[in-house]
């Protein structure tokens, strides 16, 4: 091992390995169900109720289409 860094799941490949913790492999399922202890969630914060472009972004991100894009990009969707 030459270094340790946090990164998104899509970066793992044959040369970049995810850290196995307590026998739990990193992956979409273990990140989503919380069994992989070093996964983290992404939060969208706004000052008050989102409006304008911020609301469009939040609405898209939470929509079925947005969640499908999240999954296709290799990240873990909410569902």
Image (cartoon, rainbow, N blue to C red):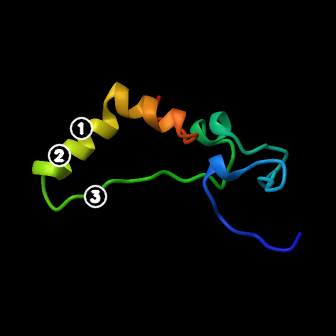
Give me the disc on residue 59.
Answer: 1
Image label count: 3
Is residue 56 shown left or right of residue 66?
Answer: left
Left or right: 20, with 26 as reference point: right
Q: Position of residue 58 (x, y in %)?
A: 26, 44
Residue at 44% over, 29% down = 68
Q: Secondary structure at mark 1?
A: helix
**Residue depicted at 33% across the width and 39% down the height:** 61
Residue appearing at x 79%, y 43% in the figure: 24
- Outermost residue on the top side: it is 64
Q: In this rendered view, identify the residue nearer to me: 8 or 48.
A: 8
Above or below for 10 versus 71: below
Q: Is 18 rendered above or below residue 33?
A: below
**Closer to the eye: label 3 or 1:** 1
Tell me where residue 75 sits by quadrant. Answer: top right
* Residue 44 % position (x, y): 32, 54
The reply to whether discs 2 and 1 touch (Cβ–Cβ < 8 Å) is: yes
Badge 1 crowding class, 10 Å Cα cut-off, few under 14, some 14 to 19, many 20 or more, is few
Residue 55, label in figure: 2
- Rendering quarter of residue 76: top right
Q: Which mark is residue 45?
A: 3
């Amino acid at each position: 091992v030459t270094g340790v860094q946090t990164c998104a799941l899509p970066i793992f490949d044959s040369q970049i390995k995810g850290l196995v913790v307590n026998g739990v492999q990193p992956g979409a399922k273990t990140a989503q169900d919380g069994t992989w202890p070093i996964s983290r969630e992404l939060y969208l914060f706004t000052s008050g109720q989102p409006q304008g472009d911020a609301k469009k972004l939040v609405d898209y991100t939470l929509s079925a289409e947005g969640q499908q894009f999240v999954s296709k990009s290799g990240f873990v969707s909410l569902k």
